[in-house]
Amino acid sequence: MKIVLLIVIIFTTQLGAQDIIPWQNIRNSAYTPDDSIHIRFESLGAEFSDTFVHFSTSTGWDSVATFGVYEFTQEAILSATPDETQTTLIKSISDEYISMMPKQTAPLFPPPLTELSFVSEDPVGDVMVPDRPHLDLTGYYWGYTEDTFNAVLSADAPGFPTDSGGIIPAEFYLYGMGIVNPENALQDSVFYAMIYANLSPFITPGLYRIMGEELSLDSFHRIGDISTDIQNHNLQLACSIDELVDDEYFGDWPNLSNSLLISAVTISFSLPDDVQIADFTIPSSQFFESYQIEPFENTLPELSDPSATSENGFLHIEVTYFDADEHFPTLAKATINRETYQMFPQSFDYSQPVQFSVTVPETDWENILISFSDNGYDFVEENIYNTNTDDEMLFPIQTLTSFPNPFNTETTIKFSLQETQHLKLNIYNSRGQLVNTLISDELTKGDHFVVWNGTDNNGETVSSGVYFCSLITKEQNKNIKLMLLK
């Protein structure tokens, strides 16, 4: 079997995910009244099915799932430890690989499993060599100290035998944790492994560079020692970081993404040189970073430069937010005529002032209340007053209503015109994006009725939520809120 093929099978199909660190702009809120703290970040680079934040507590470690806030932004709500430094680690899972920040442990071997990061389970029974349950991996762990990388392989059977027994064994077994520098592997077609085996004098427990055109005994080049420990179904391995990264073929370390690709593997050898992969786990990207939250006394954020600009039937609202503690706001809203709209940041670097904005269909309004909070109970606010209202003007639109509202499948929109008028009747979503144009024509004076069946301009059914019906003429526009429930 070609060594390049092994690398492709286990690792390099996932190298595209290493172009970027998958979690950007990690940030936190202030402490909330119930001693929680909110974490947000942008999740990029892959379609992760689940993301979790692992965090330290006064009694150990805990974990919570994230949820989507908007677009790429994910949020998690943690139990805070306001009097202690809190470490947070992120783990994201897709069907093909895992990206995660591993735990840094104390310089102790073997470390307790609870001090390592659990990477992934592996299915029982997927071993490719029959009747070898000790080669059937069931999961693996990873962690590191200042000087070592630590790994644990879990198998379906205890003991981790290195051969099939007898005076001259027919088979020999290898257990390894493969390691790849993702920014150098394709260039040199080389990867590394902490290996537990006893095929003396060819392969004994150690740290190996694996390279060559064929996967054979000649592919393995020992470059260092490892520590090993077996406890029932778990095999613990540890290698020196310096011995690994100082190898001439390893590449730069730290690399640009400060990450390694790893996967556990078991291999069966039959002499003279029959090598067969028995099992391997889903690969994972290990990013050697963490997000630290130091204890703090909260300073309230500041708002400045509020504005509201009217254009083409829409109202664009802006405000500048600054937090001396670099906290993001857990609440950012604008309230107009008792309707509340979420405001969205234009950047995520809270060490600088951040502009928030929202665009909504314009209505007759006198005041906009902008409210922000970085902890959920202390608020800072700004008001914008409309100085351009003119109650003496006569407008052509007399009424605009809909029934039923909320609605399930369709709603009838009724409006009255005081004179013949060219108009548009549009449907917008809650972010001000055009969904459907129901009318764009000249209509006569009087009452008019239009049915909207909850579809967009392409005839596709839209999702449940809040929408706005906007009736626009040359002199005026009116808006009403529609609630589609399914």
Image (cartoon, rainbow, N blue to C red):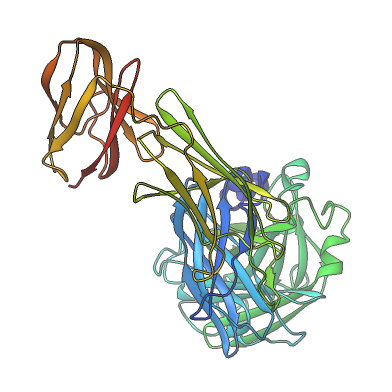
Residue 333 position, x and y percent, is 47, 52
Q: Nearer the viewer, residue 436 or 382?
A: 382
Q: Nearer the viewer, residue 95 or 179?
A: 95
Q: Nearer the viewer, residue 281 or 261?
A: 261
| Residue sitting farthest toward the front | 392
Tell me if residue 272 comes above or below residue 134 in the rendering: above
Residue 250 position, x and y percent, is 82, 54
Q: Is residue 475 shown left or right of residue 400?
A: right
- Could you tell me which residue is drawn at 77 percent across and 41 percent down? 187
Could you say which quadrant of the image residue 198 lies in?
A: bottom right
Residue 106 appears in view? yes
Could you say which quadrant of the image residue 125 lies in?
A: bottom left
- Could you tell me which residue is drawn at 65 percent across and 48 percent down? 354
Q: Nearer the viewer, residue 465 or 472?
A: 472
Tell me if residue 20 comes above or below residue 134 in the rendering: above
Tell me if residue 424 comes above or below residue 190 in the rendering: above
Residue 262 appears in view? no
Residue 88 position, x and y percent, is 62, 71
Could you say which quadrant of the image residue 162 lies in?
A: bottom right
Exactly how many numbered labels are in the figure? Answer: 0
Q: Is residue 367 shown left or right of residue 255?
A: left
Tell me if residue 387 comes above or below residue 83 in the rendering: above
